[in-house]
Image (cartoon, helix red, strand yellow):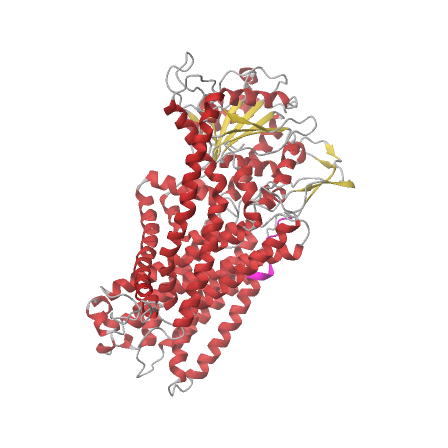
Amino acid sequence: MSPESANPEPRSGGAALELLVHGVGGATPQKMLDDPRTVRITGDETAAVYRRADDVDAELHPERYEGRPVPEAYCWSNLTSGNGSRALWLLLLPFMVINLAHWMRPATKGLGRSQRLYGVLVRLVALTLTVLLTAAACEVALDLTAWQCAGSARCVADRSWLGFLSPERQGWWSQPGRRLALAAVVPTALVVLLWYLSNRTWSAYEAQRPPIHEPTGERAEEPSAAPHKAPGTEGAPTADEGGAASDDPVTVRPALGRPGFWYGRRLVARLRAAHTAAGFLTVAAALTAAATDHDRGADSGPLGPLGLVLQVTLAGCAAVVLWVVCSRGRSERKRDGSLDRLLISALPATALGVLALAVVHAAWSRPGWVSTGGLPGNLSFLVLALAQIALIVVLVVTAHVLHRRAPHRRIAMRGLGGPAVAILACSLGGVMTGGVAQRVADWFDGDATPGTGEGAIVGPPVLLSWQASVIPVLLVLLLIPVAVLGIRTVRAARRLAPLVEREYAKETADPLRTHQVAGTRARAELTDYAPRLIATISGASLLLGAGAVAGSWLSGQVPGEAAKGTDSFVESVADTAQSIGSWLVGLGFLLFVTWGRRAYRDASARRTIGILWDVGTFWPRAAHPFAPPCYAERAVPDLTWRILSWTGRTGGRLVLSGHSQGSVLAASAVWQLRSATRHRVALLTYGSPLERLYGRWFPAYFGAEQLAQLSTEVHCWRNLWRSTDPIGGPVRVPEDGDRPEVDRGPLMDPLAYGRTMLHPLPEPILGHSDYQADPVFAAERAALLDRLPPAAVPAQRTEKEAEGQRAQGSSGRSSA
């Protein structure tokens, strides 16, 4: 429906603007404004505000818009799904997932130490994922390739590109230490690439400054504190954007209203330095462990003490990395523009220097050193698995303590959503890293099974084979909740069928049409069962992962070998699970790579992958610096600046209209506004996941108290929702005094049950899309405009300024 739909003339006159913010998947300004001729008003190719060509100088001709607002579209889709290279972030999915766990901390009251402990635990789990990825690269490059395959004449015979490393040729690179030193280039390059990607995206995201003028007469609250006005506290009179003094009581701001919430460059820089150093130290530790293992059993001369010094240095640097990760979390009470420049430059440089020493130490001549078996000292995967299990168990206890202080029935998984997501992140990391190692080992071994002693190489560490073997068991266990949800959906559709017919007042119903509508509603309800499914997956993953660690530790063999000599059924099950699991692990990683490559060439695939990022990268990088960048650190300041600049210049009324994820951006921008501006803004949300997704999974930031406060901070708010929408839903903010209930719904979907005089053709079931097609949308938008106070008298502009604005509009640029 066109933004020019006929609306009742508002009771309060003056300039009015409708700022449209699209949702997941992106949208073009032409589609949002329902006009092929659009002009960029302000912004760049990444994110910008657009108007129709006829509306560029709308403020100069208010008489044209007496009965409707000026439509304006903010397009931010290129922040997430704009080009194919961003699809490669899919390979770093575990980093994104663990970053979400940080923001899923339960809402609570008090318990400051427990809140800080929660953040520290999540950051430590994130650090183990970086070490795990680097260790996997070391496993492939150093162990499987340089140590095992290059040291085996049988393996090298089929791979001529490794011939120069073969001991039989007795070349300079034939010694194991030199082969390892050369192979260390691969994991080192991976760490450098991660550093580069994180550092490059900083300038486009974290570096975007929020508005210069911070909210006056207000102070930020802890994320868990209940919103309230501090009694008896008066703020000093300050000049607002209109020049009037404000002496309102000091208001405690929610976490998303903090001046520095969307400006986390200092923490990201610190974490980037620590994780980069951890990656370099992991490579150095692999080289040093192999070299010192040989030196202990041989007359190595000064190399032995040098190896000991390297080990002590590695331990000291690792302690510094842990201190950096644990010592500081996010600081959001002000826009912290400072950077710990000495730390962020010296720590990675020192770790790189230690790595260089480890390379020289390993490459030193050691005649008679022969590589046999697996890489010595290769216990990193077992140590990492034990560390992750221990950290997650403590995280579960901490989250339970926090939730118990302030429970709420709508919070997902009773506050354990963060630990559950952390388990999923570790599981994804294990699947992806183990998948690479298993595929490379299978490639080197040919038809033999890694770890059985039948091939040319020994294979990857035993733990990776055990982890792969539990994947078929996990998939079988998942069939149970999936079947339960399927049966529940069928029953829900049958239960809803008579309700659908009564809503449309159909005495003679069409069974097929009824089934379509009822089935859509039933499937939309599946979103509310996501916590149960995630709880099942995460709980099973934790138990099976612990079992894999125990099995590999106690047996020291792959499952197939460990089961030999037992019952024939157990032996066959172990062999089958190992074979299928190895294949599934490799398939899973190949799917990630395939999707990433396809996204380079296929715009539709790039758009689909971008949708995943729209949901997963809303939050800043607070736990993992190598996670995909947070687009909201650009989008929220954009929206805030635009609202402040337009209301400040015109004094007009503004309706902030957000669909789906756009409603989350709109709400976040409202929290960042100054008090006087917030009360001149109306909020219209539709298809919004504010409560259904964000309120349940991120209760410390979008909980019931925060949403209730948001409804009092804007002048008026209306939320439209449908029962056929699998994403959006009600925000559950009740009526409060003279403020009506925020929710309006469920809206009728489809608009007509069958063919009517007004709808001669069958109406589609819209679900999550096209809310503007419903007449209720235009009516609610007009009602919001009517409730806004009259526009202030705008400042007079000269003819020269007017000509400048017209020129800016015609060229697609603006200084607005």
Task: Answer whether residue 765 is magenta in the image.
Answer: no
Most common SS among magenta residues: loop
Which residue sits at x=51%, y=65%? 347
Residue farthest to the right? 232
Which residue sits at x=35%, y=76%? 363
Quadrant holding the N terminus: top left
- Is 273 left, or right, of 180 in this rendering? right
x, y percent for residue 682: 60, 28
Q: Which residues are magenta?
A: 325-333
Q: Is residue 498 above or below residue 473?
A: above
x, y percent for residue 492: 45, 34
Between 742 and 791, which is closer to the camera in this rendering? 742
Task: Answer yes or no: is residue 678 visible.
Answer: yes
Residue farthest to the top? 757
Quadrant holding the C terminus: top right
Between 737 and 595, which is closer to the camera in this rendering? 737
Which residue sits at x=68%, y=43%? 226
Task: Answer whether residue 332 is magenta in the image.
Answer: yes
